[in-house]
Amino acid sequence: MESPELRVLCVSSDVPVLSELMVLLRRRCALACASNADEALEHLHADGSFAVVLTDVRLAGGDGLTLLKQARRLAPDALRLLLAHQVDVGKLLVAVNEGFVFRVIPKPLVPEAFIAVLETALEHFRLVHAERLHRERSVQATLKLLLDLLALTNPTIHARASRVRQYVRLLADHFDVADRAQIETAVMLSQIGCVGLPPAVSEKLCHGRRLTAEEQEHVDRVPIVADRLLANLPELHPIREILTYQSKHYDGTGLPADEVRGERLPWAGRALKIALDFDTLQGQGRSVAAALEEMSGRHGWYDALILEAFAKLWGTEVQCFDVRELPLQEVVSGMVFIHDVVTPAGTLFITRGQEVTEDLLEHLRNVPPPLGREAVQVVIPRTPVAVG
C-alpha cells in the first residue's frame, strides 16, 4: 500500500464558489469538481480514493449533509468538509459531533482560513494513512514470520498449504471473486493451527491416513488454534472467519457447532473445504477422478456449485501441465514439485506440491552435489498437481 495521491472532490452548485475553490486548490492537490450531488456520486462510485470531500450545504437537487453521509459509505477514508453561510453554521455543528463532518467552513470564504482548514484535513489524512501503512507492514511481517516458522518446523504441512492455495486460485479465477490477496493469505494460514501437531500426526493428515480418536481431536482443534494465534491482529478478522469455517459442512454439520450454514458460510471457507478434502484424498493416492467421485457422494458436505466448477476445472486444467524435468539445483522460484524429494538416506527433503520460494532456493544452495544433481519433475505456477 503506497502513499496515495491526495485527491479532493469539490461540490457546489454556485459557479463562482466552485471557481474560487478551483483557483485556491488546483496547485495543492488533484481536483475533481461537481456541480450537484448526482455528479459527485458519479465521482465517488467511479473512484472513492479521495483524501477530502468538500461540499456546499445547499446543492441543486439535493443537500450537502445527505451527500456527505453517502460519501462516508463510498469513500470512508476521506475527510468530509461542509461549506455553509454563517447563519447555518451553528445548526450544522451537530453533524461534526456525530462524526460524519470533519469541519464546517463558514461562507463567504476567507482564503487563508480556508486553506488552513484544508491543510489540517490533508495532514490528518496523511497521518492516518501512514499509521495504517505501518500497521499493514507490521501485520505482513508477522504473517511471514508465522509461515516461515511453519515451513521450518513442519514442511509437510506448509507444502499442503501451498498445494491447496493452487486449487483455491483456480476457483477464485473461475468465479472472479474479489479480495484475491486476502483469500490466498487465508489459505496459506489455514494450516497454521497445525504448528503444535506431532510430526507423525501431520504425516497421517497429509496422506489421508486414519487417525486415532485422540489424534482427530487435535486435528479438529486446528481452526481454533489458528484463530487464537491471529486473535490479536484485528485487521485479520475476515481471514479468521474464513479459517473458522474451513472444516464446516455446507449443510451446517461439522465444526464449529453453530447455526451458520449454506451461503452464510464465507465463500473462501467453502472453497477451502473442497480444496483441503481433495488434497487429503490425493494424499491417499486417489486419482483425480476417484477423489472427485468420492467427494460428489458426500451429500451436504460441499457447496455443489463450487464442487461442480472444481471438477470441470480439473477436467480441462489437468490436461495442460507444463511438466519439466531438471536437476534439483536448477529449479527456479515459482515452480512446483510434483513428487516428494527424498535424500539418499531416505529422509523426506521436499514434499510434493511444495512451491519453490527464495527461501527454499537459499536452502537448496547448500545441498550435497549428489542430491543437487538428482532429476526432479516440476510444473509451472498455478497448475494443479495430480498424484495417481
Image (cartoon, rainbow, N blue to C red):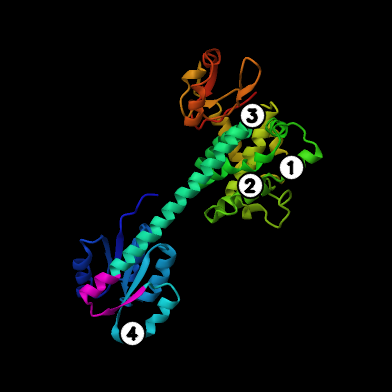
Callout 3 touching callout 2 (CB < 8 Å) = no
Mark drawn on residue 88:
4
Q: Nearer the viewer, mark 1 or mark 3?
A: 1
Q: Which label's residue is closer to the chain start, 3 or 4?
A: 4
**Quadrant in the rendering for residue 132:** bottom left
**Is 350 left or right of 204, judged from the image as shown?**
left
Where is residue 272 drawn, in percent x and y?
Answer: 61, 42
| Mark 1 nearby-residue class (10 Å; few <14, some 14–19, many ≥20) | some
Callout 1 touching callout 2 (CB < 8 Å) = no
Q: Nearer the viewer, mark 1 or mark 4?
A: 1
Residue extent of the magenta highlight: 103-117
Q: Nearer the viewer, mark 2 or mark 4?
A: 2
Residue type (three-letter) at the residue carrying disc 3: Val
| Mark 2 nearby-residue class (10 Å; few <14, some 14–19, many ≥20) | many
**Marks 1/2: CA distance?**
12 Å
Q: Which label's residue is closer to the chain start, 1 or 2?
A: 1
Nearer to us in this view, 353 or 383:
353
Where is residue 270 drawn, in percent x and y?
Answer: 62, 46
> Which residue is labeled 2 in the image?
226
Evaluate whether residue 266 shows in this view. Answer: no
**Marks 3/4: CA distance?**
70 Å
Residue type (three-letter) at the residue carrying disc 1: His
Q: Which label's residue is closer to the chain start, 1 or 3?
A: 1
> Which residue is labeled 3 in the image?
288
Q: Is residue 107 magenta?
A: yes
Q: Nearer the viewer, mark 3 or mark 2?
A: 2
Residue type (three-letter) at the residue carrying disc 4: Asp
Q: Secondary structure at mark 3?
A: helix
